[in-house]
Amino acid sequence: MESAHPLTDVFQYVDDHKNKFVESLSQAVSIKSISADPELRNEVNKMMEWAQAKLKALGADVELCDIGQQTLNEKKVQLPPVLIGTLGTDKSKTTICLYGHLDVQPADISDGWASEPFVLTERNGKLYGRGSSDDKGPVLGWLHAIEAFQNTGTDLPVNLKFVFEGMEESGSIGLDELLIQKKESFLKDVDYVCISDSYWLGTDKPCLTYGLRGMSSFFVEVEGSSKDLHSGMYGGTVYEAMSDLIYILNQLVDVKGKILIPGIDEGVEPLSEKEKELYEKIEFDVDAYISEIGASKSQKETKEELLMSNWRYPSLSVHGIEGAFSGPGFKTVIPRKVTGKFSIRLVPNQIPSRITEIVKNYVQSVWEKRQSPNKFKIYTVNEGGNPWKTDPFNDHFLAAHEATKTVYNVEPDYTRCGGSIPVTLTLQEVTGKSVMLLPMGAGDDSAHSQNEKIDVRNYIKGTKLMAAYLYEVSKIKH
Ligand SMILES: C[C@H](N)C(=O)N[C@@H](Cc1c[nH]cn1)C(=O)O
Ligand SMILES: [Zn+2]
Ligand SMILES: [Zn+2]
């Protein structure tokens, strides 16, 4: 007879407390912790305090660390604190550092959500709400997994260190410095680092993520006048800021996604035959991917080209224009000042500061060709995020592999992610230990988009996966 898994009670507890766990996600989602909006800084602070209380209730020693201020539009703004915590100090146990973020991307029902983004709403087994998948659901998953160990009288087999921040969606400003400062104290005994803040490649197969892209983001500001102008009264008489900006933005990337900035491939690793084979083996349905997002055609010809373009090559996206009219109807105005925003996803071994220099020089040269007398500025508001990639063939990944088999009954795929988590490389460098990404959400969760969701299945099974991961890692000999 097959013996029961040692975590049978823990798994049962998670199933039995599904409603309670959904309610706790609902509370977290209701806090509008949008880090990009300085007016909502109190909401991010509230979110950090909410999580602090949760960690405290689990018996962790917690601290909200002041990480100073940021400068936004020439004004100093207080950064939200970083929540750190310690649960267990048993020298005979392995210590795992868990990182997650509690801030979210902006969202408004008028963007096209089917229900209020800050009201968690269940429809057809999916929990819709901003942050449900990125990253409040996964952070709560860790806390609920610990609760399940404790409330079933099952020994928590590891010591835990928590690092939860409130600025990840805005470049993790101030976090690197804090972690470097805590290298010899709080982070000293860490054996492994785990981050749950990426997604499966598709909707059915769990994954372990071994790479992320980095990011440099840019603001291009053009100012033409001291006030907005009637386009009938002034059209044809002035140099227009918006036309200048469009001219610049149009010289960044071509229709096939090729970045037009000379030198932008600096540092990109050459593709080896072995790596090429890896892409050929990955199960991935391009048509399903394109149809799920409602696009008409893939920009890339093959599965391999598409995945490589997302994981191992840089890409440039234009995000928006501040100051331009975007309401319904027609406003015949010439905007006085417009700010275009674009970013470049970086890959190993690109260096954000070097790429920033290359991009600024290029945009400056495009501006000079334009010969406009308007005021022009290109600037960044953070140092950018580093790319990260690790070798997934080690005991740490093997433990997560086993945990996935236990919970999902399948072998996980090994994937990279086109997104960025700026602190990943720092955590690896400061601890000197293996870092792994263990995703909870599915590939169609719409993080950053309208109708972000997490499937109830992923939320509940993902919580069990986290429990199983802690258990499997505790068995690694070290
Ligand atoms: C992958 C992760 N869940 C995520 O969404 N990261 C953000 C990080 C970021 C950096 N600047 C702004 N946001 C991302 O990849 O966009
Ligand atoms: Zn995000
Ligand atoms: Zn995230």
Image (cartoon, helix red, strand yellow):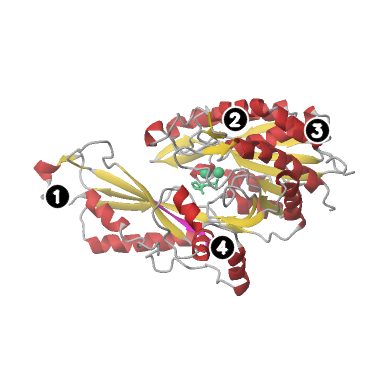
> CB of mark 4 within 8 Å of CB of mark 3?
no
Dot in front, 1 or 2: 2
Rendered residue at 27%/42% (across/down): 324
Which residue in the structure is indicated by mark 3? 9
Dot in front, 3 or 1: 3
In the rendered structure, does residue 346 fall within the stretch colored magenta? yes
| Residue 288 position within the rendered picture, expressed as x and y whole percent measured from the top left | 49, 53
Rendered residue at 54%/51% (across/down): 420
| Residue 144 position within the rendered picture, expressed as x and y whole percent measured from the top left | 70, 32
First in residue order: circle 1 vs circle 4: 1
Kindly report the distance in space between the C-alpha atoms of the residues bearing marks 3 and 1.
73 Å
Is 17 left, or right, of 110 in this rendering? right
Which residue in the structure is indicated by mark 2? 25
Kindly report the distance in space between the C-alpha atoms of the residues bearing marks 3 and 2.
22 Å
Q: Is mark 3 on a helix, strand or loop?
A: helix
Mark 4 residue crowding within 10 angstroms, few (<14) / some (14–19) / many (20+): many
Badge 1 amino acid? Val
Which residue in the structure is indicated by mark 1? 238
Which residue in the structure is indicated by mark 4? 348
Kindly report the distance in space between the C-alpha atoms of the residues bearing marks 1 and 2.
52 Å
Dot in front, 3 or 2: 3
Badge 4 amino acid? Pro
238 and 297: which is toward the camera: 297
The part of the chain drawn in magenta is 342-352
Is 320 left, or right, of 383 in this rendering? left
Q: Is residue 140 above or below residue 366?
A: above
First in residue order: circle 4 vs circle 3: 3
